[in-house]
Image: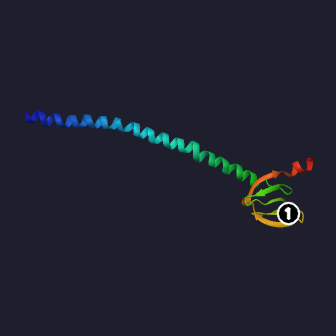
Amino acid sequence: MINLILTSAPAASSAAGGNALFQGIPSIIMLVAIVAIFYFFMYRPQKKQEKEFAAMIDALTVGDEITTKGGIIGKIISIKEETVMIETGNERTKIRILRSAVSKVDVKAEDSRDA
């Protein structure tokens, strides 16, 4: 009788181990779902926004009217590698700023010629 109990104990533990494996699968699926949600709602839109910003910075041309991140509004009069010279106000004050400081392009150079 003791032999019967001892031989049936490993079989019972292996059956319980098999069930434990199936009990962990929903947790793994939930973790994968959370990672996928994080990717589609956080990482992907941020990368898209960074690409759009880089394209806007690369497309700057002389004559564009821009707004900086600091709120300065001006017209681009010259462009160098990393800097942009803008002209602001009635007195035509010239300010040199970094290209990365440009927040948005208000009026493209082609649009201002048409108006």
Identity of the residue drawn at 58% across and 43% down: 41
Left or right, 13 with respect to 114, comes to: left
Please give the name of the residue rendered at 40% of the width and 36% of the height, measured from the top-left corner.
26
Above-or-below relation of 56 to 30:
below
> In the depicted view, which residue is nearer to us: 5 or 109?
109
Q: Position of residue 108 (x, y in %)?
A: 84, 51
Q: Is residue 107 above or below residue 76?
A: above
Q: Out of 15 and 89, give the one closest to the viewer.
A: 89
Q: Secondary structure at mark 1?
A: strand
What color scheme is it? rainbow
- The furthest residue to the left: 1
Q: Is residue 110 left or right of residue 98?
A: right
Q: Where does the image place residue 31, in percent across and percent down from the top left?
A: 45, 42
Residue 114 shown left or right of residue 29 in the figure: right
Which quarter of the rendering shows the N terminus? top left
The amino acid sitting under disc 1 is: Glu
Q: How many marks?
A: 1
Seen at 87% across and 48% down, the residue is 111
**Residue where numbered disc 1 is placed:** 87
In the image, what residue occupies the spot 17% across and 36% down? 9
| Mark 1: few/some/many CA within 10 Å (<14, 14-19, 20+) | some
Q: Position of residue 81 (x, y in %)?
A: 76, 63
Looking at the picture, does residue 73 appear above or below residue 22? below
**Percent x, y of residue 102:** 75, 58
